[in-house]
Amino acid sequence: MPTPEHAPNRKWQVSDPADKELLARVKAGDVTAFSVLVDRYKIRLFNLIYRMLQNREEAEDILQETFLRVYREKGSYDPTYAFSTWIYTIALNLCRNELKRKKRFKFFGIDLVKNDRRYAVEESGNKNCLSSTLEKAIASLPDKYRTAFLLREVNQLSYEEMSQCMEVPLGTVKSRVNRARLMLREKLKPKIKEQYELSKSSPIPIRLF
Amino acid sequence: MNCRKVRQYLFGYFRQELSSEERERIKAHLDSCPECAREAEEISRINFLLKDDLETFVPSTDFNEKLLAKIQTLSSNEEVSNKRNWWQKLLHEVFPSVKLRWALAGAVSVIIVAWAVMFSQRQTPIRQEYFSQDERQMESQTQVSSQDIADSLYQEMLKRVAPTSPLRNKVFIIDNFSFSASRGEDGRIRPEDIYKRFVIERRSYLPTGRRGSHYVLPVVSTQPASQKIDY
């Protein structure tokens, strides 16, 4: 298996040896080191959690809980694994529990997610509409496929890292990512075509995507 | 490589996830198959879309402050927990949530109350337990004590149990029974009737192993003793 090469415009560095040093300083009682860790991870985790839960407040709560756990359990971190893997595992478990809890409420007829699916429209109101279509398409993926997809395509983890933090075998991770991509492709098909036709008929070149 | 297989790998193709050999094979197929080439183009569009068009959301600006404040309270809680002595620590370890601790306290108090009730029942003298206020009064008028009843029962037993029966040598402990007695015309319990209509039965709501209560069982009854005593 070739090592996956990440996209050139990689937004966030995935794992950094300095993380472990920072955590060691946090263990020694250094609060600034903890803020540095928080700053380093909060955005990528927030984007993951937000897209998983599709509710801003809940996502912030879960993000906070993730860091609190990191702080509380700092002694139990196993340094043979990357810090990023550890923190992703925590965040994913919290997400999973939260989604389960929501489903349970839904089962009892209390729909907590009813009004939450609007986030893409709200937040990217000034963006072109395909962007929100893309968010919607991602949001409509089943949970486990969405997790795999987001970790791979947005957070740009390697398959090995994903397998560790999702706690599933490598082959399963790969097939989930692939399935998710194909599902997404099906969902986006009509939209892509529409835009494509539009760009062909219009004399002014428009930015496609 | 057939079209189906190629289409499965197209995303990986654009994401540089394939070996050079696989890439070559897919490229060769795309050159020869216009259908797959069109598919590939669409996927490359989605790929661009994913790279460039996904917005990066940021948590609210006071996220760090809130988090650090929470951690402050957390550490002060830790200090509190360091002040706890060993059993408090154990309690907080086993029952981390406040709700659970309250539930535990509730359960313990229920158990204590239930036990106390049972214990007090056990201590209750037989008269108070089985006689209503009214009957107790009447009984005191007839001057029958439980000692009298016990004596009468013993006499009755001697009458009913054959002289050779080993029952005669037993010690009878008379407690833990209920009985009914007939009343005279005037509504009073007559001392001469009081034991004749006793039905003694074992009450087993208390913890088993009450000493001796089962000895009493067959001795005095409205039914002939021979049917009840099984020797």
Image: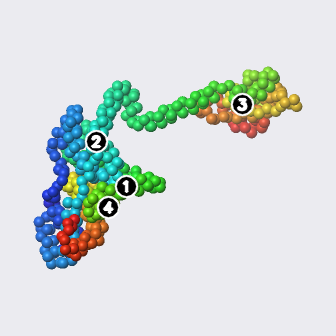
Report the mark closest to the observer, 2 or 3.
Answer: 2
Q: Chain of mark 3?
A: B
Element type where label 3 sits in the image: helix
Circle nearer the N terminus (2, 3): 2
* Distance between mark 1 and mark 4 Cα atoms: 11 Å
Q: Residue furthest right?
A: B185
Residue B62 image label: 2
Residue B18 appears in which quarter of the rendering? Answer: bottom left
Return the x and y of residue B110 as percentages of the image width and height: 54, 33
Is residue B144 shown above or below B203? above
What chain does mark 4 sit on? A
Residue A78 shows up from this direction:
no
**What's the amino acid at mark 3?**
Tyr
Task: Give, as a three-letter code, the residue at label 2.
Answer: Asp
Disc 4 versus disc 2: nearer the observer: 2
Numbered tag placed on residue B130 in the rendering: 3
Give the class, few, some or many, for how many residues have Cα within 10 Å of label 2's Cα (few <14, many ≥20).
few
Dot in front, 3 or 4: 4
Q: CA distance from mark 3 to mark 4?
A: 76 Å
Q: Which mark, by number, is residue A116? A: 1
* Mark 2 element type: loop
- Residue drawn 17% across the image and 50% down it: A13
> Label 2 is found on which chain of the structure?
B
Could you tell me the amino acid type at mark 1? Asp
Q: Is residue B130 left or right of residue A32?
A: right
Task: Return the residue at label 4.
Answer: A136
Residue at the spot x=30%, y=51% of the render?
A49
